[in-house]
Amino acid sequence: MIKFIPIGSACAQSGFRLAHISDPHLSHLYDVPWRQLLNKRILGYLSWRFSRRHIQCPAILDALIKDLDEAGAHHLAISGDLTHIGTPGEYKQVAAWLGTLGQSTDISVIPGNHDSYVRSDAAQTSDHWSAYMDSDVEASPFPEGTATFPLLRQRGPVAIIGLSTAVPTAPFFASGRLGQTQTEALAELLDRTGKQELFRVVVLHHGPLAHSNKFRKRLIDSAQFRSVIKAHGAELILHGHGHYPVNDILETANAPIPVIGAASASALSDSKTKRAGYNIYEVNATANGWKIQMQSRRYDRHTGLFKEREKLEFHLPASRPRKTP
């Protein structure tokens, strides 16, 4: 299991450390029942059979988890595509893997488009991960049992707000959608957590900027998402989906907000942009706002280890003036 740093006095002294991985595609399809492939899944199965199973490497994911364990973090966010085609068997594989990483209170998971390839019975699929996708009881924006997302978890000075863009799509499409219910709830959560002077991290699978994805892979209602962020604020936006690292900015009237995309967590590639990687963020409160120190770590296929690729630092104003003693 990952030795997560306990949240307490040490957090206040050295900052809150949030790790982010995405698109691990850790499941396999060797024993998938053929009846489950009589739909769009057959295309994903063929992609896995002839390509993805040679690219998404479990050993690399194991090396990443070992590196994360040594680097240290208070919490881990996983932004989707844990499976290849979202079969019940894959959901069970992923549930077992999550159990080897740590407690659900230390890990927040949101689904990706591969996890919602077709419409499926939640009891056979997403319910296996429900503990990792639940909001804190006191923080949930919905009455119990009416919705899962947005996810809201407070960890130390950080509010983790997880959104699901995972919806079944037509063959050859990998687009996502938030929907009106989520965007309206997101606005309320951003206001609430902003008033609490929390550092608001929004996590979703699809890149939310206009240029983030190709047409068939886009977030369909990304404009609505950006409007909510511009109106209600956030401090950091994290996503995956593209399988390559992204460092972007969403300009708002209050401050530019970092929009960071993670590479696939398990990709074996000679390409510098497609190589497996993940990010760690250290968040510290300052007199006037927040300081974010981001460390990007990438896989080195020559050593089989993850190494620091770059460091970035961001300074953001507080969502409202700090309270004075």
Image: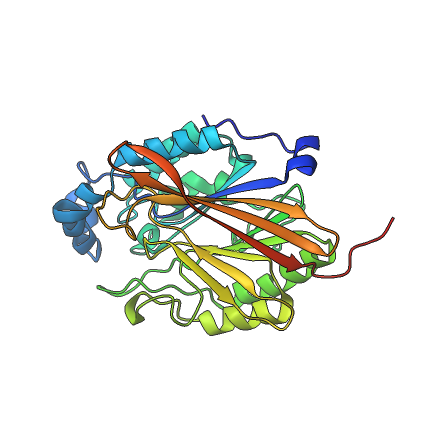
Q: Is residue 69 left or right of 169 when viewed as pictured? A: right
Residue 187 x, y percent position in the rendering: 61, 65
Number of callouts in the render?
Answer: 0
Residue 202 x, y percent position in the rendering: 54, 56
Q: Is residue 226 left or right of 245 when viewed as pictured? A: right
Residue 303 location, quadrant: top left
Tell me which colouring the rendered structure shows: rainbow
Residue 267 visible in the current orientation: yes
Q: Residue at x 52, y 67 (%)?
A: 250
Front residue (pair 47, 262): 262
Front residue (pair 91, 265): 265
Q: Residue at x 54, y 38 (%)?
A: 75
**Placement of 232 over or under 1, stated as above or below:** below
Q: Is residue 18 left or right of 247 when viewed as pictured? A: right
Q: Residue furthest right?
A: 325
In the rendered image, the quadrant that contains the N terminus is top left
Residue 138 x, y percent position in the rendering: 67, 45
Residue 225 x, y percent position in the rendering: 51, 68
Q: Residue furthest left?
A: 50
Q: Residue at x 65, y 63 (%)?
A: 188
Residue 204 visible in the current orientation: no
Front residue (pair 283, 310): 310
Q: Residue at x 68, y 51 (%)?
A: 198
